[in-house]
Image (spheres, helix red, strand yellow):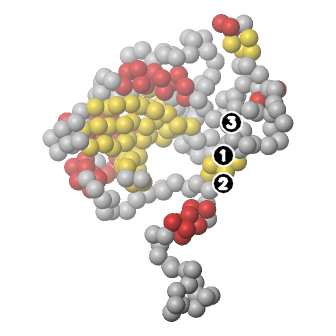
Amino acid sequence: MSGPDQPPDAPAETDGNLPARLGEERLNAPVVRQGMFGVQDTPDTSGYGLLRVHKAPPLHSERPYGSYFDEVADSLGLSDAIERVVVDRGEITFHVRRDRLPEVAAKLRDDPALRFELCSGVSGVHYPEDTGRELHAVYHMLSITHNRRVRLEVSVPDGDPHVPSLVGVYPTCNWHERETWDFFGIIFDGHPALTRIQMPDDWKGHPQRKDYPLGGIPVEYRGAKIPAPDERRHYQ
């Protein structure tokens, strides 16, 4: 709405904090969405509907990182073991060369300026289109002493999915690495008992990979079969 001293056709304020301006920037972001709820032309009623969200992630962050991140990076050192550092949404991730992972983890744990006493979890990610780096193992580190959090991330090719185990540095990784092996097929070398933890011992494949089928897998203990998405009942 124009004021008394503003022409009727004057442009709106250009303040970047205006909700309308922020909403316009969000809609113009390089994101492609397909599927989710309300999907059409597919019998899949699960809500998944071949959902795809493509947005180029930040590949590398430049110093200064902000917050306590610069202090952690300086105390950690080992720049030759770090492939890149990504700061995004108030979180920092150190992408580590896989052969140096135990060394970096031990430094995070033992250095008095760092004191990341706990690895709170290990998770896997599968990027089928990231040739030569299809499988990622992600470690979530917590410093109880300094109340800080960082992540370590290791990338390996699907054809050579080996990552050194961190059980010797963080015993809590024992079950987490087993779960990541079970669901993603990442082999943690040196793990004391790398066996399945969720799926049956004789299960074939790793169910959380993106190329794993969504349905049609025999469920022997129920004597039934989960139909593939294009075979399910749908309502229109």
Other residues around mark 2 within 10 Å, as few (<14) / some (14–19) / many (≥20)? few
Q: Earlier in the sequence, mark 2 or mark 3?
A: 2
Measuring from the top left, give residue 187's x and y in whole percent: 49, 26
Which quarter of the figure is the C terminus placed in? top right
Q: Secondary structure at mark 2?
A: strand
Q: Which numbered tag is attached to residue 32?
A: 2
Q: Residue at x 52, y 54 (%)?
A: 57
Q: Which of these two is toward me, 235 or 82?
A: 235
Measuring from the top left, give residue 40's x and y in whole percent: 79, 43
3D distance between C-alphas at marks 3 and 1: 12 Å
Q: Which quadrant would residue 150 be assigned to in this image?
A: top left
Task: For the residues labelled 1 and 2, say whether their Cβ atoms are less than 8 Å apart.
Answer: yes
Which residue is tagged 1? 52
Q: In the image, which is nearer the foreground, mark 3 or mark 1?
A: 3
Other residues around mark 1 within 10 Å, as few (<14) / some (14–19) / many (≥20)? few
Task: For the residues labelled 2 and 3, say whether their Cβ atoms are less than 8 Å apart.
Answer: no
Measuring from the top left, give residue 119's x and y in whole percent: 32, 32
* 56 is higher (above) or lower (below) than 233: below
Q: Which quadrant would residue 132 be assigned to in this image?
A: top right
3D distance between C-alphas at marks 1 and 2: 7 Å
